[in-house]
Amino acid sequence: MCHCAIRPRWFTSAFLSLAMVASSIVLAQTGVNPSREDLGGARKIYSPYIARTARNSNFAEGVFWGDTHLHTSYSTDAGVIGNTLPPEAAYRFALGEEVTTSTGQRARLIRPLDFLVVADHAENLGLAPMIAEDNPNLLATKNGRRLSDLVKAGNGYEAFQVWGQEGIAKNTDIIDNPKMTRTVWDRQIRFADQYNDPGDFTAFIGFEWTSINTMEAPSNLHRVVLFKDGADKAGRVLPFSTFDSYDPEDLWKYMADYEKTTGGSVLAIPHNGNLSNGLMFATERLNGRKIDKNYAETRMRWEPIYEVTQIKGDGEAHPKLSVNDEFADYGTWDKADIAGLKPKTDAMLPYEYGRSALQVGLQQQQRLGVNPFKFGMVGSTDAHTSMASTRDENYWGKMASAEPAPDRYEHYVIRALGGDDALSTFEYETIASGLAAVWARENTREALFEAMQRKETYATTGTRIVVRFFGGWDYGDEDAFRADAVSIGYDRGVPMGGDLKAFPGKDKAPRFMVGAAKDPWSGNLDRIQIVKGWVNKKGQRQERIFDVAVSDGREIGPDGRCKTPVGNTVNGTSYLNNIGAAELRAVWEDPDFDPKQPAAYYARVLEIPTPTWQAYDMAFFGTEMNANVPRSHQERAYTSPIWYTP
């Protein structure tokens, strides 16, 4: 039994009032509350965080994690072949709620995302739900009725083939009903505005423009289009599709018209250059003319960032281009184009991968005075399941047909249209990638969008490694280890995505300050590298990798490389974090710096080996896969570059 006295509320209030009076007398006597006069006229600002913001309004307070490229049942290539989850389910899953998947399984994330772009294909947006609802605008068209009949007869894949071969492959809208598009686009916008919760979760309005150029050269030129705005502005347009044009220059005109007529803001994010037949970063336009200064300026106006890693392969580097990089062959897709028709040639590769494209951009800068490929980096999923899942032990596949099942690894992702299965790609070749990390002031549409515009972003292959990367002229050797290292980074230099101008005065080499912390739910860190790209006096692309921080006391040699592997503790689906480091930091100075030579630098952070989704599948289902299927891999992060321009 409790014998505590229960004081009536009036007693408590009276006691507090007496205490406050007494405190006021004491404070007055001791001068604890100084007057404005005591502090002097123009007072200094005591709080360092006020001054910090005043010095740099873009000071990024935190990193926010998201997916800028997710498809739902509103994408025809998802909805008519099994995905039953609408955008609403995608948002709930991203927020950390449990959902029932299209195959009836229970799924949730280990932790929620901070932002999401539902980027359904613009081409016949919402065809599947319109079929399910017997939409009169759809059924009023000949092909709309035809596709509806196929789907309702259980022949969804046949309907998808008809739509793809007669429509997408020919850049022809076989339904052509803007009323249907308007209905679905308004729903998409309504869902995004409903789930957008400034400060806690950002739901961007967006869509994917799905150009494959032509079937004579089926090249992936896809872009995700992302609006900064809400329904009041984004609702005044319809998505731009490949039926409107397959040329990205026409997409940029659409974006310019949008901003001019609405006062809004929009950007585009290209992806999967590895399936572009060398066209993603080509030095010729689709009209056959050489890219010029206007093209370069226009492209960088509308496409500040590039999706460098996702399910359909990692696009940072290729082993044939980076022969001295033992980590380059990661998630490599290099068999053929997006349709599996034309085999890949070595001549295409430099114009398909992020690292070489940065160097091609420097080559063009020499010629034009403007760099057309001066992009930051993000990762995203391109999942067509409505579920942004990027962890290997929780991987829900590319399509609904590839959700967890004993035989899913055998399913096609790209079935070669020419019939040559050597040019097909299968589910076991996908990677559980990736995530977009954005350094911003706050979690709002405005702050995240502006951070993307200034390229203060980075990509990961699905893990949440935290990375800061700064470039400047005056960082001290110990600055990376100071508690105020981030403030020093901004005050004395530029963050990832920034431009480092020539040092005013005596020539000196730039210094880069980098730090990384492990994902607490993933593997320790193996190393931090800085990748430098430049063009020599002959105009040839050059690159060099420097290990700048390594774990476990290993040594970095005079050539800037650590030749000792971190080790591998993976055993089936388990691994040990008794190797590697929880955190790595470094200040590094370029030993080969030429002040007359433009260059691009970015950081790559590698985890220790961890199990792949294929290893988890083999353990869970008791299946066996080909020995060439990776059982372990090293997840990684790629920062946006810092460019040095004399």
Image: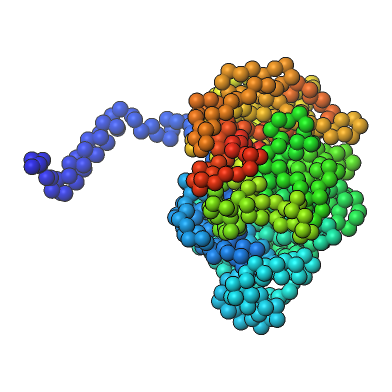
Residue 368 occupies which quadrant of the picture?
A: top right
The image shows residue 394, relative to residue 232, as above or below, that is above
Q: Quadrant of the C terminus?
A: top right
Image x and y of residue 574, in percent: 49, 35
Image x and y of residue 72, in percent: 58, 61
The image shows residue 610, relative to residue 127, as above or below, that is above
Residue 178 occupies which quadrant of the picture?
A: bottom right
Residue 23 as seen in the image, left or right of residue 454: left
Residue 555 as seen in the image, left or right of residue 523: right
Q: Quadrant of the N terminus?
A: top left
Which residue: 60% across, 44% down?
A: 625
Image x and y of residue 324, in percent: 76, 29
The image shows residue 226, relative to residue 365, as above or below, that is below
Image x and y of residue 501, in percent: 76, 33
Camera sees residue 644: no
Which residue: 69% across, 81% down?
A: 141
Of residues 231 and 158, the one nearer the viewer is 158
Of residues 354 and 409, the one nearer the viewer is 409
Which residue: 79% across, 59% down?
A: 418
Of residues 154 and 108, the one nearer the viewer is 154
Camera sees residue 218: yes
The image shows residue 582, relative to residue 119, as above or below, that is above
